[in-house]
Image (spheres, grey):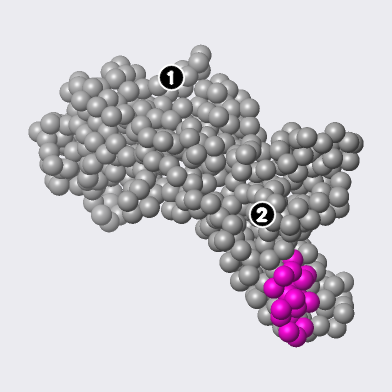
Amino acid sequence: MEIKDHIAKLLVSLSQSQDAEIGDGTTGVVVLAGALLEQAAELIDKGIHPIRIADGYDQACEVAVAELDRISDVMSFSKTDTDNLYKCARTSLGSKIVSKAHGQFAQMAVDAVLSVADLERKDVDFELIKVDGKVGGSLEDSVLVKGVIVDKDFSHPQMPSEVRDAKLAILTCAFEPPKPKTKHKLDITSVAEFKELQKYEQAKFAEMIQQIKDTGANVVICQWGFDDEANHLLLTNELPAVRWVGGPEIELIAIATNGRIVPRFEDLSAKKLGHAGIVREMSFGTTREKMLVIEECANSRAVTAFIRGSNKMIIDEAKRSLHDALCVVRNLVKDNRIVYGGGAAEIACSLAVEKAALDTPGLEQYSMRAFADALDAVPMALAENSGLSPIESLSELKARQGKGEGRGRLGVDCMQTGTNGMFTTAHNCAVKTLLTILADMKEHFVIDPLISKRQQLLLATQLCRMVLKVNNVIVAGSDENDF
């Protein structure tokens, strides 16, 4: 999508920043920033200077972040007790295209993160998680492999399709005779010279293969290609080989197998070999397409999420959805404090900012009230998209939370389950309507990581401050309509 408006480009960058830092909450941060800019425009029309508006937004953001810290809950989990992490990942996937298999994808996300996580340091190395896909099958056929999957197969069809107790030689050097480093021209004038050259090449290939065999390697992973003669020699010497493996895959294989990447045959030694329990080819359907699976690696932390789908678009969307779930679980490993969704946290922050505005002298109090109104945009959007009355839902939510009932927990009942237990004894029509408007988000387990919600507030406020400080925009164009 081509975007020409400069503020719209900033909103795109804002969403990208949220995705890079947190991995989830990109829609929420854009909605909030748009609401803040809309409120700022109204204040400017009233004659309030943009700098005073920006200062008020900063004060309101501090109050809102402090309120998030106050209403947050701690969510416990461990390597063995992962139910809470599973529920969080499942919540993240509920609105995605993989929702029909969101239970399976949520479990994949939890298992993948915990496989590479260091819970003591609260660190997750995403470099050890690879997400790959192949067209064919359904979403339910997706699996998490404790190892590495490479979209390649063995270089010769007669090579064994499975190698156990594999010792991998990981090469980034070309499997071919050495060539001069400068431009060269070789003239062959007789059959004898040609045969001599052929013998030289065969001797070099045999020497390379012997160097590999001397180290004890029984599988060769090569970044570059090799010709049919080298392929035949590898086959006759019982050395299964894989060629044209990309740079990122080479690095991941080296990390997973605790091997060293070897740039020259002379540097190859037994200490630099990678180790894996099994290297096998995996075939798909009737197309005879194959992929290489390296399992039971020496470094058991490396995992691969292998996605299946009916077409490329489904697989790309499933990858993006799984990435969001992985980020949610990673964020909870880093900081296990959570706030509740469904607009509950935004309403609590809005009430806190409104209360703080009453005690704030000067024009900043108008900006703080505008900030509180902007926070209401999220629950109103949820109510409207769920077929509820936005104004009625918002007013009832603010009234109930303002009285202290379910502060930070009471949100919009998008599924209209009516599980709010505070009204269960009533029978009149008005109260029954409220049953379908409000719900306890803690009971529904609709949650957001605290660091995600806090980052949304901080990034949206920073963007608005930057836009408010822009005095004028001059754009070079061919005619006056371009300005």
Look at the image and say whether residue 94 sits in the magenta stretch. Answer: no
Q: 242 or 386: which is nearer to us? A: 386
The residue sitting at 59% across, 57% down in the picture is 71
Q: Which residues are magenta?
A: 354-372
Question: Which residue matches tag 1?
Answer: 283
Other residues around mark 1 within 10 Å, as few (<14) / some (14–19) / many (≥20): few
Position of 47 relative to 175 (above/below): below
- Pick out the residue farthest to the right: 429
The amino acid on which the numbered mark 2 sits, given as a three-letter code, is: Arg
Q: Position of residue 46 (x, y in %)?
A: 87, 79
Splitting the image into 4 quarters, where does residue 365 fall? bottom right
- Pick out the residue farthest to the top: 286
Helix, strand or loop at label 2? It is loop
Counting residues from the start of the chain, the first of labels 1 and 2 encountered is 1
The residue sitting at 69% across, 48% down in the picture is 410
The residue sitting at 71% across, 80% down in the picture is 360
Splitting the image into 4 quarters, where does residue 30 fall? bottom right
Taking 180 as reference, is 203 left or right?
Answer: left
User: Alpha carbon of mark 1 to alpha carbon of mark 2: how far?
Assistant: 54 Å
Q: On residue 407, which mark appears?
A: 2
Look at the image and say whether residue 364 sits in the magenta stretch. Answer: yes
The amino acid on which the numbered mark 1 sits, given as a three-letter code, is: Ser
Q: Position of residue 42 (x, y in %)?
A: 85, 73
Q: Position of residue 279 (x, y in %)?
A: 29, 26
Helix, strand or loop at label 1? It is strand
Taking 17 as reference, is 47 left or right?
Answer: right
